[in-house]
Amino acid sequence: MKYICLFILAAGLSACAVPKRFSTLPRPGHPGESPFGARIDWGNYRYRSGELLAVSDSTLWVLRADSVVQFSRHSMPDMTVYIMRTNEKYKTVGWLAAGSMAPTLGHGYYLLVSGPATLLVGAILSNQSVNGTYSLRYPEEVGWDDLYRYARYPQGFPGG
Amino acid sequence: MTRLAIFLFVLALSACTYRYHNALRQTYLNANSLMHQTGQPEQPFLKAHLRNGDVVIFGNDWQYDSSQAVVAGAGKHFDFNRNLVRDGPQQIAVGEVALFETNAPEVVRDRDQIAALTVITALNVIGAAICLTMPKACFGSCPTFYYGNESHIRYADAEGFSNAIAPAFECCDLDALNNASTMAGGTTFHLTMKNEALETHSINTVQLLAAPRRPGERVYHDRNGQFLRCSGAATPRRATGPEGDILPLLQASDAVERFTATDSMRLDAKEFLYLEFDPPQTGKQPGLLLQFRQTLVTTFLLYSAYGYMGDEVSDYLAEMETNPRVKAAVSNPFDLLGGIRVDAWDVRRERWVFAGELYETGPIARNLQVVPLPAGLAGQMPIKLRLQLAKGLWRLDYAALTGITAPVEPQVLAPECVEKNGREHDAARRALSADDNSYEVSLPGDTYRLTYQMPPGAEDYEIILASKGYYLEWIRGDWLLDKNPAKLRRMLLNDPSTWKSLAREFKTLEADAENAFWNSMVESNKTTGL
């Protein structure tokens, strides 16, 4: 019982943290709140991801953890532009997912089925809430000429 | 299962990306275009991107003063590196602004997840409420065994040592697996053993008793552990109970069972069933073959007793180990309820004579046992039998008259290989092979697959499971609320008024308890060897 309660607590707490790579994105009800640019991924996001800094007619700049990467228009790979999160009450969803486990402790023998099932569904929904994003695919859904809207410096690099 | 879970997670990850409406974010090169193109001076979520790279984010009370060419309002000013410079009233000259940006809010998706989780939570609360109002209906029972492809508890082929609720009650339990021909399985026989309850199982041995059989022959065991070679099985030509004709319920091993509700005043109130058979072939001793299991009465009583022990369960269990009187008292309720007594009608003496008794604890797996009948009955026409049993305690699935040809001594088989939770586990194999001081301890969710080597010398074997051990129930928190040592004492001493109150309590749970336990099950379509 002690371990189940600890697990529920851990599950709830883990759902309360937005992943770092989406932490600068605005919430859907507060779209202008972030001073940062959109998050973009190209290829495998674990290795190719960063904040969209600026876009000129021929160059796109991306801020990664410790460096600025630039792409020419002609060599730009396909990418996903993450513009804002889909959820605002992800903490509520996380705690609700964790809380939904609690009644299963009273299920007796059926806990063996209802516990994992609730955990799985709760984890999926909590994950959706925390990781859910509004995005656009380049070049299918957003062209080069519109990418600047989602940059930190839509006016172009200052002094650049 | 693991792959399914990973698939669902991947699906969930891919499903949580929504397409953004490109038109929801707009930019304007100057204040005039901002004011004219939006046509909405109070456009919320205004961001002013300055020429030096700073950005000012205004709240929804910003205003444009065309006379001074400034935008003013409460907001936040961030520098080039997006460090917060100032939070509060802001005033920006439009000449410093390189670009204005407006944003419209998107759909907030919280409602989807919250609605789904609310439904799940509500279902779980309802489930918990059912179990909390009927805590004694939510349980499993002892190690469950499966020899075929089925592994759902509804189709368990056996449940081991159900009444061994403490080390002092450790016992060997025989269960006929009622197996089809072993010829199809080659030289090996596989058995699955599970812990499907909130219990700790200490298992001493899991052996198979294999008795050779020829086509048309079966080997059954009686309550005394005697193995009898039998041939033929004739269903009754007439079967009646207090409710009338029960013959259709007893003609096949099909999980369509005959049972009744308990008496509302006395759980030990008895009822009689009457069976009539044509005699078996000449020269054979008749034997009554009965397939049966218990209802939830004994489990209710056991869990009630645990409840009355409250937080002193371990003290009572220790008493059972060390005090023979306490140990004997635990058996009192079982003696009061009794087994299935079989009487035969003696034509010459014109009265019912005791023929034998069947008993096996447990509400899950159906037991198949034989009661040898007096040899003199073979000449009677018809053979009349009377079953005496506590009302509402037993479920009968199948009854037949078989001919006993000879006693037989089966071979004892120990497992050749044991897998625990998918991995070969030699220590478990050693522990389960012999009746000694080594035990295999299983916890809820543990699954074992045991492989036995069939002996040479016969093409087909009747397989009887011999399991020995004991189990410890996990005490649920809500049981502690029922602590009542005085009632426990009266219950174990078979006090009539206490048993009357138990009967009334069970009566209030009886119908729903059965539903709660079995509702998740599906009907059996499994064919047996009968």
Image (spheres, rainbow, N blue to C red):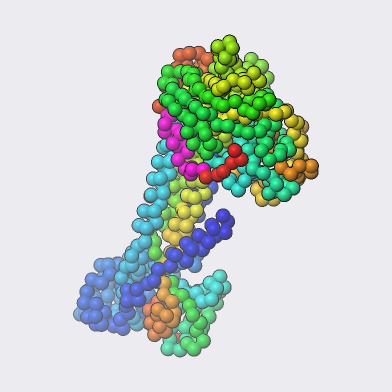
Q: Residue furthest right?
A: B457
Q: Residue B189 in the image: x percent, y percent?
A: 70, 45
- For residue B354, which quarter of the picture? top right
Kindly identify the residue that appears in the image at 70 percent across and 29 percent down.
B405
Q: Is residue A31 above or below residue B100?
A: above
Kindly identify the residue that appears in the image at 47 percent across and 87 percent down.
A73
- Inspect this view and state whether residue B300 appears: no
- Range of residues picked out in magenta: B509-524
Name the residue nearer the viewer: B349 or A59: B349
Q: Is residue B194 above or below residue B379?
A: below
Q: Is residue B275 above or below residue B410?
A: above
Kindly identify the residue that appears in the image at 44 percent across and 57 percent down.
A125
Name the residue nearer the viewer: B513 or B438: B513
Q: Residue B185 in the image: x percent, y percent?
A: 69, 48
Characterize the magenta stretch by its predominant secondary structure. Answer: helix
- For residue B223, which quarter of the picture? top right
Q: Is residue B179 left or right of residue A78?
A: right
Q: Can you say which quadrant of the picture contains the C terminus of chain B? A: top right
- For residue B418, which quarter of the picture? top right
Please tell me how many numbered marks the rendered image carries. 0
Q: Residue furthest top?
A: B349
Question: Magenta includes B515?
Answer: yes
Q: Is residue B136 above or below residue B520?
A: above
Q: Residue B254 in the image: x percent, y percent?
A: 52, 39
Q: Residue B197 in the image: x percent, y percent?
A: 57, 38
- Inspect this view and state whether residue B192 appears: yes
Question: Magenta includes B207?
Answer: no
Kindly identify the residue that appears in the image at 42 percent across and 18 percent down.
B265
Name the residue nearer the viewer: B330 or B417: B417
Q: Can you say which quadrant of the picture contains the N terminus of chain B? A: bottom right
Name the residue nearer the viewer: B121 or A158: B121
